[in-house]
Image (cartoon, rainbow, N blue to C red):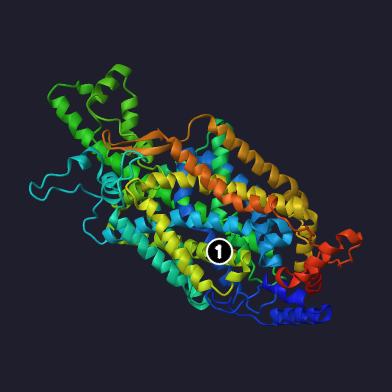
Amino acid sequence: MATEQKVSAEPASQTQNQVDSHSTRMATEEGPPEPAHNSKVVDRRTSKYVWKSKTQYMMTQLGFSVGLGSIWRFPSLCQQFEGTFLFSYVLLFFILGVPLVFMELALGQNFRSDVWRKIHPRLGSVGLTCSLITFLLIIYYNIFIAWSILYLRNSFMYPLPWTECPKWTVTSIPDSNCTRATPSVYFWYGQTLHITNRIDDSGGIVLNIGICLLVVWLFLTVISIQDSNTKGKILYFSVIVPYVILFCFLIRSYLMEGSIYGLRKLVKTKISALFSPILWWRAGTQVFFNLGCGCGGLIVLSSFLKMNTNCAQDAFILVFANLASSLLAAQVVFSVLGFRAATFVRECVNQSYWKLMELIRMRVLPIEVHPPENLMKMPVRAFNMWLNHFNDDLRLQVLEHVPDCKVEEELVRNTEGPGLLYMAFTEAIAKFPDATLWSIIFFLMLINLALSSSMGLMQTIQILLQDTFPWLHNSSLTISVTIGCLGFLFSLLFSHHSGLYFLNLFDDFIGTVALCTMILFENIAVAWIYGAKRFMNEVRDCMGFKVWIMHEFLLRYVTLLVIIIIFICYLLSLGKHPTYTAWDWSTFEMSETPYPEWALILGISLIILIMLPTLVGLLCFKKSVILPLPRNSSPQPLEAPKASSSLQDQQASSSGKTGSLFEVQAAEAQVQ
């Protein structure tokens, strides 16, 4: 590392004066972080460059952690497991979220750059593992931005193209494929994704999606090489505006009929579901995904803070803000879904009413089934309740001619995965007054949320690579362009006709298994290799007080045990062959389809590829390992037999390249 090279190459007294001088300047001067593309090497321990303000730092952290995971993944899992998931998620959020976020913020704030090598020399390649996880996350994360751009473009049409089936230009007859499904389903699967029936059938690249991906990566690359002031202005907009839009949607949906049905489903809890291993696995991994743990972003962003910043307070603010954002997004989604269900049930009741009247007039049905005259003015559940008061024979006779119009069925229709946003939610927006305006606002919000997270991921990859490979410190512009080019090429995989299935594959393996594995490894490294008590004491020395709720027992035993239990739940859920949800054009329905063997091998290979740098660093580290000294201790001379003196001389002679860890630790101790 650049800092270690300077410190180890100078006499001890000169090193001490230099460190004290840098520390004084850091405590008295404030300014924005050094631009990522600046050729000047910036060390985050001694540099005067810190966040321009605490507000800018917190906004950046929120923009990084609060993204589409809160408005897509979280509501989708709530839809799948109902209120039981909400309970398990909140429970794990406090057990795991608070201590893990605190741990990562404290790591970045106290160790600055090259965190893992300072914890243990064999862990120097952990940063590369984190950068690989972040890279794989961003390449499938950006496909949501591409889809949202396509929907935003179509939102300017009137009427909205997902509200009615397209017609043949010659005959003006609606497309038969659309009439067999619904306009929103056909627009999503047929006109946006052009989806195939299975993951094996690639179908080639969808040109519109590929062009939108190119626009996204160009934008991210250009932004990543801008100065911090420009990034700060963009972040203020991209973080604040989505919350304003969400509150507008929440108020609007509350004023509409049926929102209460969606909110009831959100909090509906089944005690038996708490014994499902897959529930706890999904809840735990969603906590990690929502908070951004395990991919290095929290560590990188906090490494620009001053050493005496209250990282415990920052952790609580971030955790509660993230939880509030998820709950707000879930309320918006479920209240809008409730409105959609009430609207479609109302239309179903209206059609059933007139059909029953016609059948009674034709004497196909007896007069006893005459619906109430004021049925259309009653609540939407009134029709189903009226049917239930008949005896079984008469009720079955009625249901042979008309549907039962259940709200519960409409609440779960077309809500699988991304379809929750691009089918169910858009279908509901189409029923809003001024639907075009609301559609434009909604997709602008999605693009804003996703871009703020993607910008944080891009910056994280760049800084992690520079920390892992010090010779890249002067190549920030090259790194940004390289990440943009490689990211675009790899993300083209998701622009294929089968791209949605590959997104599910990456989300099942990278967004869950790999992320959870990395967090488990980080927890072991800090709590057991470096030492939880030592870590907490050093954090206390930096902040000037002890955070009693963050006891070393929590990091050493509680979080580790819970993460292991979550992994056990994952293993228990593997009793059946992993499946993905595929669209069947023959039946026009979704079906659970087993992953082919090559897809599972691909997912497992990606996890092995991600963890490979860390495993190689642990097993193949050839140099003698000198553990870092505690911050408040001073280096002691080594008393070793003469046989080992050559090894010490070799280390001393190469200090210009690798740095003396003892001298660095002594200098850091004086800084504290």
Q: Residues within 10 Å of mark 1 (few under 14, many from 20)?
A: many
The C terminus is located in which quarter?
bottom right
- Residue occupying image coordinates x 78% and y 66%: 651
Query: Which element carries disc 1, helix, strand or loop?
Result: helix
Vertical side of 285 occupied by 28: above or below: below
Q: What residue occupies the far left of the structure in this picture?
A: 170
Type of amino acid under label 1:
Thr
Q: Position of residue 202 (x, y in %)?
A: 33, 45
Which residue in the protein does label 1 denote? 460
Of 535 and 139, nearer the camera is: 139
Q: Quadrant of residue 659?
A: bottom right
Q: Could you tell whether 50 is left or right of 137 in the image?
A: right
Q: Name which residue lies at 15% across and 44% down.
A: 174
Establish if 295 lies above or below 393. Answer: below
Q: Does the image show residue 96?
A: no
The percent position of residue 394, horizontal first and vertical second, equals: 27, 19
